[in-house]
């Protein structure tokens, strides 16, 4: 048999909840996994969208009806998301259905994504840290907070993230994927003028104290070395990854992290507005992936990329990881099987997207494998394969589901056996 090339099927409950002809439930996952069976795809269940989760958590508020703006008629189909979550524990339903159909399930977390507000549509703000803004990275004078990136060095923050890890493991998942992509695109709320003054973030008490212990300087008031400051923040992030990896490996599960393939930017710059791109330059830390791999914190690393505004067959460039990590360490590519087109259909509407053809998606996979990747994450494939519109045509996608993609992947899998 050919060496296994892993394919992941990222799945965000929000989209099929809004477009599937019935409310999502256990029967839905039996339907979906009957299509996934034999394709070689590993199902990646997204655990949170910004500050709300998609399972009954003791440590995070679920996506609820209060998250939806009642005043806008165009936003009301968002209520189908909490309606699905109210019916049953959907992650448990997914795991059980996957076992019946021989499909692997992983958890997919986004931990630098804790708030997203789209005025008139949704309010996905984390309630746990709503009145604790210092749990997020702050500006040097302590007056502004980036309500997306947590204070990696705060022990209460770490304990909460470890508790979320433990909750994931309780579902008997096969592994966990931690993405650093984010829908938190602005400090705090997207109020008028938020982008008129941008500044570096990450001067929290934990960072200040670690820098003072190491170098005898209070970075809030005194000149400091930026490289050393970024290394301090990076070590705090590395400590979290080490503890998460220890939790995962203690249960015999794998842990992969997805990051932008550069040393310093924490967030993928996938919002094309110049001000948001500029903001990403102020969300920086040193990413020591050699240490993550060498110390056994992670089992693989994925090069993530922006959601494209036009079709891009090539995935994110993994060459930097291949050049700096030990030979054979698993590197993965993030492949966008869709691209965004503004058709004015509202925030996160699937009618604002176009899909690649079956042949183009297969070419993307081949290109990733030829680059030496250990596998690929097929982002957005679930958009047009994971729901049944019962004859309704979705602009950009057609009538769903497009099961020909599953047929092609199943054939590909059979040819590799």
Image: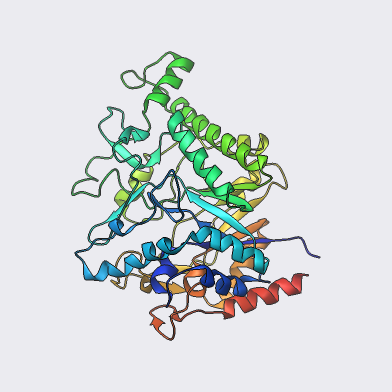
Q: Look at the image and tell me in which quarter the N terminus lies.
A: bottom right
Q: Note whether 131 is above or below 267 in the view shown.
A: above
Residue found farthest to the front: 87
The quadrant the C terminus occupies is: bottom right
In percent of the image, x 37 and y 24: which residue is there? 205
Relative to 413, 257 lies left or right: left
Residue 161 in view of the camera:
yes
Q: In screen coordinates, is 31 left or right of 328?
A: left
Q: Position of residue 358 (x, y in %)?
A: 57, 77
User: Residue at 44% of width from left, 50% of height from top?
Assistant: 268
How was this image coloured?
rainbow
In the rendered view, tell whether residue 29 sits above or below residue 123: below
Q: Residue at x 37, y 34 (%)?
A: 135
Q: Residue 232's spot in the image, x, y percent? A: 48, 27
Give the answer, above or below, for where 407 lies relative to 79.
Answer: below
Please tell me which residue lies in front, 338 or 88.
88
- Which of the pair 279/347 is nearer the observer? 347
Residue 315 visible, this orientation: no
- Figure check: 51 above or below 199: below
x 31%, y 73%: residue: 343
């Amino acid at each position: 048999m050919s060496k296994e090339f892993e394919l992941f099927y990222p799945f965000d409950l929000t989209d099929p909840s809004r477009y599937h002809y019935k409310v999502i439930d256990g029967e839905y996952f039996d339907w979906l996994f009957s299509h996934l069976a034999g394709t070689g795809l590993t199902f990646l269940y997204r655990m949170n969208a910004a500050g709300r989760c998609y399972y009954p958590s003791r440590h995070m508020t679920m996506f609820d009806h209060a998250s939806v703006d009642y005043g806008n008629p165009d936003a009301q189909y968002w209520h189908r998301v909490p309606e699905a979550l109210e019916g049953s524990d959907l992650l448990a339903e997914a795991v059980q259905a996957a076992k019946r159909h021989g499909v692997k399930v992983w958890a997919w977390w986004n931990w630098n994504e804790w708030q997203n507000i789209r005025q008139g549509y949704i309010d996905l703000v984390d309630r746990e840290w709503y009145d604790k803004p210092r749990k997020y990275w702050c500006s040097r004078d302590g007056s502004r907070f980036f309500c997306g990136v947590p204070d990696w060095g705060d022990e209460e923050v770490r304990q909460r993230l470890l508790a979320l890890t433990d909750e994931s493991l309780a579902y008997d998942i096969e592994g966990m994927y931690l993405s650093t992509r984010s829908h938190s695109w602005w400090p705090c709320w997207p109020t008028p003028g938020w982008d008129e003054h941008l500044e570096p973030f990450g001067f929290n008490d934990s960072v200040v104290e670690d820098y003072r212990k190491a170098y005898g300087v209070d970075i809030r008031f005194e000149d400091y070395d930026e490289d050393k400051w970024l290394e301090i923040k990076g070590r705090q992030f590395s400590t979290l990854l080490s503890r998460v990896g220890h939790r995962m490996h203690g249960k015999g599960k794998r842990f992969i992290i997805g990051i932008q393939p550069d040393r310093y930017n924490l967030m993928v710059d996938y919002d094309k507005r110049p001000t948001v791109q500029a903001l990403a330059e102020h969300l920086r830390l040193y990413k020591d992936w050699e240490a993550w791999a060498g110390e056994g914190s992670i089992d693989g690393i994925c090069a993530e990329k922006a959601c494209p505004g036009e079709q891009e067959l090539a995935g994110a460039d993994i060459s930097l990881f291949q050049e700096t990590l030990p030979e054979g360490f698993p590197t993965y590519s993030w492949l966008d099987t869709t691209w965004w087109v503004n058709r004015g259909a509202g925030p996160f509407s699937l009618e604002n997207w176009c899909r690649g053809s079956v042949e183009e998606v297969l070419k993307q996979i081949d290109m990733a494998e030829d680059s030496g990747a250990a596998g690929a994450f097929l982002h957005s494939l679930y958009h047009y394969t994971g729901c049944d519109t019962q004859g309704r045509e979705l602009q950009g996608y057609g009538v769903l589901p497009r099961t020909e993609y599953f047929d092609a992947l199943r054939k590909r899998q059979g040819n590799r056996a």
